[in-house]
Image (cartoon, rainbow, N blue to C red):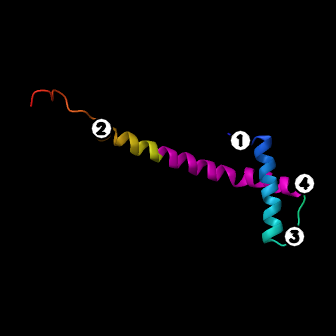
């Protein structure tokens, strides 16, 4: 499943990359280089992050499902004690 970003998100990320280079690399890069870097990161790094997020989500929900009996249990026939 390819990772796609909205135009707004991509624009914000390009601006962020340009700022990062300006503040940390002591050099300026333009929109084209920033967009090419962003595209590379999305294609090369993005899938690893996406897959880890899916793994983390699965583990989280599996834990919640395993605890379902404990957190959603109501004792039956408890009126007459």
Find the distance from the CA under tag 1 to the CA under tag 2: 37 Å
Closer to the camera in the image, 36 or 69: 69
Task: Please indicate whether residue 28 sits to the left or right of residue 40 in the image.
Answer: right
What secondary structure is found at the residue carrying circle 1? loop
Numbered tag placed on residue 2 in the rendering: 1
Q: Where is residue 20 in the image (x, y as percent from the top left)?
A: 78, 64
Numbered tag placed on residue 69 in the rendering: 2
22 versus 68 height, above or below: below
Find the distance from the CA under tag 1 to the CA under tag 4: 21 Å
Find the distance from the CA under tag 3 to the CA under tag 4: 15 Å
Q: Residue 47: say if magenta.
A: yes
Q: Which quadrant of the view contains residue 81?
A: top left
Which residue is identified by label 4?
32
Mark 1 vs mark 4, foreground winner is 4
Magenta span:
33-58
Dot 1 or dot 4: first in sequence order is: 1
Dot 3 or dot 2: first in sequence order is: 3
Quadrant for the N terminus in the image:
top right
Mark 3 vs mark 1, foreground winner is 3
What secondary structure is found at the residue carrying circle 4? helix
Which residue is identified by label 3?
27
Q: Residue, x 84% and y 57% (percent of image)?
A: 34
């Amino acid at each position: 499943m390819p990772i796609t970003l909205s135009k707004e998100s991509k624009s914000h990320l390009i601006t962020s990359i340009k700022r990062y280079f300006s503040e940390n690399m002591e050099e300026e890069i333009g929109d084209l280089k920033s967009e090419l870097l962003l595209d590379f990161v999305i294609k090369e790094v993005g899938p690893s992050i996406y897959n880890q997020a899916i793994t983390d989500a699965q583990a989280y929900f599996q834990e919640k499902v395993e605890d379902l009996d404990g957190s959603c249990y109501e004792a039956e026939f408890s009126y007459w004690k």
